């Protein structure tokens, strides 16, 4: 009976993990454009850092997030960001943009975190 409970418990955890992975993969496959990927990132940023000021720039956000030492391909993220900004603000047609790098960044953000400004960090 004890081993049956352990097996059931393990099964429940495995099914939960599979469900989480499937949900993330499904979210990734729904994103059809870089605009949608940046929309997902913006939503994740607002959830993770509710005190993020209005009118923030993507470069400002990437600079702050790089200081968290997350193991992401920052070169690819910055490359994608430059191409997106050139498209969005310069009217330049972009190609070979990696929406997956932006989504990985969005999914790596903590949930419900508190934004701490650099001045608060330096004053402590």
Image: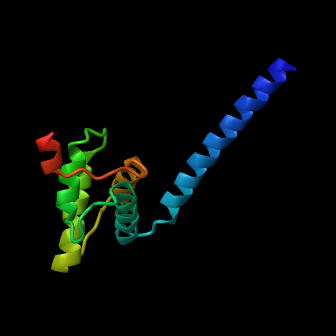
Question: Residue at the location (33% across, 51% down)?
Answer: 114
Which residue in the rendered view is the most extreme toward the top? 2
Q: Which residue in the rendered view is the most extreme toward the right?
A: 1
- In the picture provided, is 61 more to the left or to the right than 28? left
Q: Quadrant of residue 49?
A: bottom left
Q: Give the colouring mode of the picture.
A: rainbow
Image coordinates for residue 37, horizontal then vertical, percent: 38, 64
> Is residue 124 visible to the viewer in this orientation of the structure?
yes
x and y percent of residue 113 in the render? Answer: 37, 50
In the image as oriented, which residue stretches furthest toward the bottom?
91
Residue 34 is left or right of residue 82, and the answer is right
Picture residue at 67% right of the left edge, 36% below the top: 14
Question: Which quadrant: the N terminus?
Answer: top right
Q: Residue at x 36, y 62 (%)?
A: 46
In the rendered view, tell whether residue 8 sits above or below residue 37. above
Residue closest to the eye, 9 or 112: 112
Q: Mark yes or no: residue 92 visible.
A: no
């Amino acid at each position: 009976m004890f081993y049956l409970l352990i097996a059931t418990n393990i099964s429940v955890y495995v099914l939960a993990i599979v469900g989480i992975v499937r949900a993330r993969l499904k979210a990734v496959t729904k994103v059809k454009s870089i605009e949608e990927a940046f929309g997902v990132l913006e939503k994740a940023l607002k959830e993770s850092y509710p005190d993020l000021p209005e009118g923030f720039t993507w470069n400002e956000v990437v600079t702050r997030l790089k200081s968290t030492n997350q193991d992401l391909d920052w070169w690819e993220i910055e490359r994608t960001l430059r191409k997106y900004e050139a498209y969005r603000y310069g009217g330049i047609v972009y190609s070979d943009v990696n929406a997956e790098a932006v989504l990985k960044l969005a999914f790596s953000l903590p949930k419900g975190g508190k934004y701490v400004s650099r001045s608060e960090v330096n004053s402590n």
